[in-house]
Amino acid sequence: MASLFDVVTSTTINGNCAQYTSKLDQLVTDALKLAKAGVQACDDYQKADPVAERLLDAFFQKPTTADVQSAKSWYEYLEYWLENGGPLTGRTQKPLLFCEDHSQRVTMSTPMRDAQGQINPNPNGKGSYLIKDDPKMVAWQKSIATSLQVAVSDVYPYWDKTQLLYWMDEAKGTALQYQCAQNSLGYTNSQASERGAVTLCPSSFAPGTLGSVAPVPVTLASYKANNNYPPTPNQPINDIMPAAATFFHELLHLFTDMGFVPSVGEEYNAWAIMGTMARANNQPLFTGSDSISNAESYTFVAGAAWYAQNMPYNGQVVEYYTGWATVP
Ligand SMILES: [Zn+2]
């Protein structure tokens, strides 16, 4: 991991990875396997392999030829970067890796820190130069409020002491907390950032390594006979996803400057992604174009593809295109 990211390990820095250093290389190993499995699934799809067809047709909702080609390119890009690393396009330093929330939420009335982290006097008056004295920060707050569709006063500056920069978002948790406090598994900051930063929340380390969970399939016939619901014991796709799934997901955001977020918002539920289940809060059903621009779709496809390619059950290929482990 240290060849790909500047891993924050100093225990004096908020969000450091000191507790997790022994687990980080495994994330890279598993993410690389996921990327390769994704490339293979796209190749197989283009050769009309029925296992790959069922998987991609389900999670990407009958993708076009161009969609599959584009998905393959992204899996190949991940594979390449995980093997070679390097700064993001147009940047000079490796991205940062944190393992817990790390930035401090402040208000617009707080003294503004410069690119060296220093507070400066207000040239037009007494006291310090405040964040709200800076026209760029005021405009930025407004533009984030517009994109989040919330009141301007609901958007706060967050100070990242490690990167010496600000970013803007709504308040989440206490002033020293952020998305990890809101059950997020991870997040990526690239907004106005010099180098990009991935944060893996502590909960993302809970799942095992790729392949550590044995498949528990039901037959497709028993699934269909039970009204398209597997009899017990059964296994939802979430149970086989490794700790590296969060890392893999965040890399897609990192490489695209927060892309892979559909206009209708990200979806993490496998069945909602497939469009076979309603989304939470009465949001409209996910469509194929939503799914192809949703980071978690790629993560599920890669995990399911890796199991189909590597984890047979009594000699049969195990598939997850229903959202559950099945064999023919
Ligand atoms: Zn995401």
Image: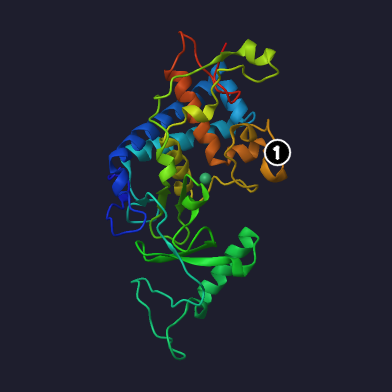
The answer to whether residue 188 is above or below residue 129 is above
Q: Is residue 49 visible?
A: no
Residue 243: image location, x then y, percent? 41, 36
Residue plotted at (44% across, 20% down): 214
Residue plotted at (44% across, 66% down): 166
Name the one closer to the observer, 32 or 46. Answer: 32
- Amino acid type, residue under disc 1 in the picture: Leu
Residue, far top:
315
User: Quick check: 56 left or right of 209?
Assistant: right
Residue 134: image location, x then y, percent? 49, 78
User: Quick check: 18 left or right of 63?
Assistant: left
The answer to whether residue 225 is above or below residue 45 is above
- Could you say which quadrant of the image residue 164 lies in? bottom left
Residue plotted at (31% across, 50% down): 7
Quarter of the picture containing the C terminus is: top right
Quarter of the picture containing the N terminus is: top left
SS of the residue under disc 1? loop
Query: Which residue was labeled with disc 1?
Result: 285
Name the one closer to the observer, 262 or 21. Answer: 21
Name the one closer to the observer, 239 or 195. Answer: 239
Badge 1 crowding class, 10 Å Cα cut-off, few under 14, some 14 to 19, many 20 or more, is some
Q: Is residue 174 visible?
A: yes
